[in-house]
Image (tube, rainbow, N blue to C red):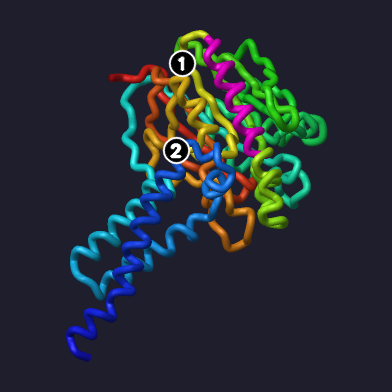
Amino acid sequence: MKSSQFVASRWPLKLWVVVVASAAIALSALLHRHPEYHPIRAMLQYVPFPVYLAPAVLAVLASAWLGWLWRGLALVSLAWVLWGVMGLSWGEPDAGTGRVRFMTYNAKLYLATERPNGMAKLYEEVLQQDPDVLVMQDAGSFDEVEDTNPGLYKAFVGGRSVYMKGQYVVASRFPMRDCKQVSLQSTGAYRSLVHCVITAHEQDIDVLTVHFTSPRDGLNAVRAERFEGLDNWATNMRARLSESLSMRNYLLQLPQRPRIVAGDLNAPEPSTVVQQLIDTGLRDAFSSAGKGFGFTHGHSLRAWMPSFLRIDHILVSSQLGVAQVDVGGAEGSEHRPVVADLLVNRLP
């Protein structure tokens, strides 16, 4: 093949690299600028990551037949997908004293009780992580475990004080008081949060756990009805926004002391749902000190599918340090837990 023909034959590869680079930049911007205010943009937050990753990887492979400039562009596009779209984090741990190991877990307890060894797998996860403070969502039948299997319940609790209300469980090795359920305003079904105060290392800390409306019904409506399902999706989306806004307003009324907000927010960190909470003075623990993607959900959708969404979060106020944070195993629940070693006395 003549050199001119070879150069001409590489234009499709160059075009692919340019298209992928442009799409990565545009998609990152769409996902980070209030996507919930547009239904189709909001759906992009829940797309399995291979859909975004595969074109970027192919662009890197295609650039092997191109010059260094094109290879560099392809690698930058891949990096943009990993960081800007998929949310790769490479945080730095804080320094401080007064360690508190905190765990949030959407336990799907109603499913665990129906599976062979389901409760045992949940217990093994909690035992392995050994949190000082454990908050669980979708754990409404936990009080039944106390009646039907007191031995397992005692092992599960592990000497912690326990508060149960609705779907929520808060268990703490530190003194805990003033626990209450707070209703949230929602355009969907009834939603609430649970708020307790723990005293750890001589410091009062507000602990709040919440579970916002799942996107599942809205996404299924679009999958089944295509464009006709967009109205259902928009309604579903507005429910999460209203719950987040209601919780934000509640947080703004609390005393200015350390606080932890944790639970299944059913939205990734760049979403408006999460950002409304962060704007009250919180930060995401995984983004602050975690390494990797921190995906917590998606592995239960298909047997071969890994987790691909980070929708379970631990948010902390600036007074608290984050020494380490990671996600747990996938065996116990449809959600991986998030576990963070927090520092009550954060050093500058």
- The residue drawn where x is 64% and y is 55% is 301
Mark 1 crowd level (few <14, some 14–19, many ≥20, 10 Å Cα): some
Secondary structure at badge 1 equals: loop
Mark 2 crowd level (few <14, some 14–19, many ≥20, 10 Å Cα): few
Secondary structure at badge 2 equals: loop
Image position of 247 (left or right of 291): right
**Residue 258: numbered disc:** 1
Q: Quadrant of the N terminus?
A: bottom left
Residue 75: x, y in percent? Answer: 28, 59
Question: Please, is residue 19 above or below residue 323 in the view?
Answer: below
Image position of 34 (left or right of 297): left
Q: Amino acid at mark 2?
A: Arg
Question: Mark 2 highlights which residue?
Answer: 33
Q: Quadrant of the C terminus?
A: top left
Viewer-side residue, 157 vs 166: 166
User: In the picture, residue 108 is in which quadrant?
Assistant: top right
Viewer-side residue, 326 vs 175: 326
